[in-house]
Amino acid sequence: MSELQPIHTKDAFPPAGPYSQAIVTPHALYVSGQIPAKPDGSIPEGTIAQKTALCIGNIRAILAAAGSDISKIVKTTVFLTDMKNFAEMNGEYEKHFGIGGAVKPARSCVAVKQLPMGVEVEIECVALPGENALLWTNRKQQQYYKGQGS
């Protein structure tokens, strides 16, 4: 029995390779790196702040599809192709996390030589699964154990 559930939503940029937008387990939701691209695959021009907001918008859509939300993110990793963009990215990032006294997730930010499709920023995260994901996992476990005669 697999306790891994792939998540896919048409409301976020589709995977550009052999991977899932996210994987939910009984204990965590792993969201693949999201680039500043629209669900139709287009990559709009704009500032680093606008691109960061688009990455976070994709993350929000994927979390929603998994029954979770941005307040359940425990860790993010931000990838930048140039650390000169850190302050602008950080200014936009803080608009989305820790709102209303919510806990801000742990975060790493690293500079990389390049990112897929020539973008300047990418964000991935780990979140707590939503109740729907836990219900799905519990149903799968019950089906498994019934099949085992337990």
Image (cartoon, grey):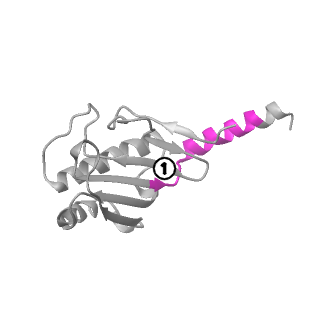
Q: Is residue 39 above or below residue 85?
A: above
Residue pictured at 68% horizontal, 37% vertical: 139
**Quarter-of-image position of residue 105:** bottom left
Report helix, strand or loop for mark 1. strand
Residue located 42% across and 40% down the image: 21
From the viewer's perspective, tell me whether residue 10 is left or right of residue 120: right
Residue 98 seen by the camera: no
Is 5 positioned to the left or the right of 123 in the image? right
Q: Quadrant of the C terminus?
A: top right
Question: Which residue lies most toward the right here?
Answer: 149
**Magenta part, dominant SS:** helix
Q: How many marks?
A: 1
Q: Which x, y percent locates residue 25?
A: 58, 47
Above or below: residue 105 compared with residue 113: below
Q: What x and y, as percent, mark residue 117?
A: 25, 41
> What amino acid is found at the position of numbered circle 1 in the picture?
Tyr
Closer-to-camera residue (12/116): 116
Label 1 environment density (alpha carbons within 10 Å; few <14, some 14–19, many ≥20): many
Residue 7 coordinates in the image, percent (x, y): 48, 37
Left or right side of 126 for 82:
left
Where's the N terminus, which quadrant? top right
**Residue at screen point 71% across, 39% down:** 141
Residue 135 part of the magenta segment:
yes
Drawn side of residue 144 relative to residue 55, left or right:
right
What residue does disc 1 label? 30
Farthest left residue in view: 46
Q: Which residues are magenta?
A: 126-144
Does 56 appear in magenta? no
**Residue 41 appearing in the image:** yes
Image quarter for residue 92? bottom left
**Percent x, y of residue 37:** 25, 41
